[in-house]
Image (tube, rainbow, N blue to C red):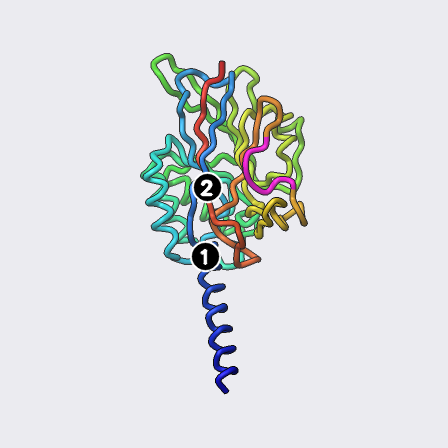
């Protein structure tokens, strides 16, 4: 009996440790900073800070959202970008998602493109989401380009985005970019990273891959949508000459409800003028 009790106690302790680890991996937000230098960037934008959020998958008023807002506010970004999957089409909580987005607009201008979960919503939910986001001042960037101006001389960068699609055409996307300006591009799916650069995007921000869901030391992510096992593009900065794509590991979970060695992250990218 004594031996059995020791075994049961050990199993319970291991289970509690595992539960604690999984909770930490899924709830403990981290901030990952990057710098990106470009000769195309105007001097007025040197030091311009972008806060990149992706794959939040809002399902309910979970405790991580107030912490998310507090961390974003502390970063003092010039703009906030959301690269899709603000909510989860399987268990969406539209009001919480809208409340989160509205609070973020109080911190900095918010630029947003849809992900596959928005595109999977019933049409009435989709149109309601888009209308409400627009009404609160979120910049809806699906197939649109806007200029951000800074400095006394009216220097600007372009911000463009595309609605989520499993297909990407370099020639069509290239129409959105200006070879004489710095082009920031928002696109949910990272597997087209090289194509975004070929099309003319100086810096692309993406998500969707959830960091590979489970990250294996010295190997990387295990599995990602569209890329499947051992995805090439699951997180981090990927350079293509003088252009780059930065991929967020995301904040929430979807079909696979947990992360391993893959904490949810807020990404910041600080722009620097090169040369």
Q: Is residue 255 left or right of residue 158?
A: right
| Membership of 242 in magenta stretch | no
**In what element is the residue under mark 2?**
strand
On screen, residue 193 versus residue 38, left or right, reads: right
Furthest-bottom residue in this view: 1
Q: Residue at x 58, y 49 (%)?
A: 215
- Which secondary structure, mark 1? loop
The numbered disc on residue 53 is: 2
- Can you say whether 79 is above or below 47 in the image? below
Identify the residue position indicated by label 1 in the image.
59
Q: Earlier in the sequence, mark 2 or mark 1?
A: 2
Residue drawn at (61%, 30%) of the image: 196
**Vertical side of 80 occupied by 88: above or below:** below
Q: Position of residue 229 (x, y in %)?
A: 67, 49
Q: Residue at x 45, y 48 (%)?
A: 128
Q: Is residue 235 magenta?
A: yes
At which x and y percent is residue 208? 56, 45
> Cα distance, mark 2 to mark 1?
16 Å
What is the x, y in percent for residue 47?
40, 24
Magenta range is 232-238
User: In the image, which disc is placed on residue 178?
Assistant: none
Query: Of the residues tagged 2 and 1, which is closer to the observer?
Result: 2
* Residue 108 or residue 250, whichever sits in front: 250
């Amino acid at each position: 009996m004594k031996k059995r009790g020791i075994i049961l106690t050990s199993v319970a302790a291991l289970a509690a440790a595992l539960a604690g680890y999984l909770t930490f991996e899924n709830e403990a937000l981290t901030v990952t900073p990057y710098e990106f230098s470009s000769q195309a960037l105007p001097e007025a934008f040197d030091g311009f800070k972008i806060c990149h959020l992706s794959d939040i998958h809002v399902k309910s008023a979970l405790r991580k959202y107030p912490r998310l807002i507090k961390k974003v506010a502390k970063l003092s970004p010039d703009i906030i970008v959301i690269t899709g999957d603000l909510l989860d089409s399987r268990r969406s909580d539209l009001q919480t998602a809208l409340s989160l987005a509205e609070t973020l607009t109080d911190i900095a201008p918010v630029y947003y493109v849809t992900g596959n979960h928005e595109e999977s919503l019933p049409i009435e939910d989709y149109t309601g989401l888009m209308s409400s986001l627009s009404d609160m001042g979120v910049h809806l960037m699906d197939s649109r380009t806007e200029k951000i101006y800074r400095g006394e001389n009216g220097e600007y960068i372009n911000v463009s985005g595309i609605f989520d699609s499993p297909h990407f055409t370099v020639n069509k996307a290239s129409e959105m970019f200006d070879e004489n300006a710095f082009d920031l591009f928002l696109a949910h799916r990272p597997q087209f990273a090289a194509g975004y650069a070929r099309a003319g995007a100086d810096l692309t921000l993406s998500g969707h891959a959830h960091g590979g869901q489970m990250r294996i030391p010295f190997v990387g992510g295990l599995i990602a949508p569209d890329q499947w096992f051992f995805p090439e593009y699951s997180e981090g900065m990927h350079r293509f000459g003088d252009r780059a794509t930065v991929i967020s590991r995301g904040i929430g979970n979807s079909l696979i409800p947990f992360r391993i060695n893959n904490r949810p992250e807020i990404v910041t990218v600080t722009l620097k003028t090169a040369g």
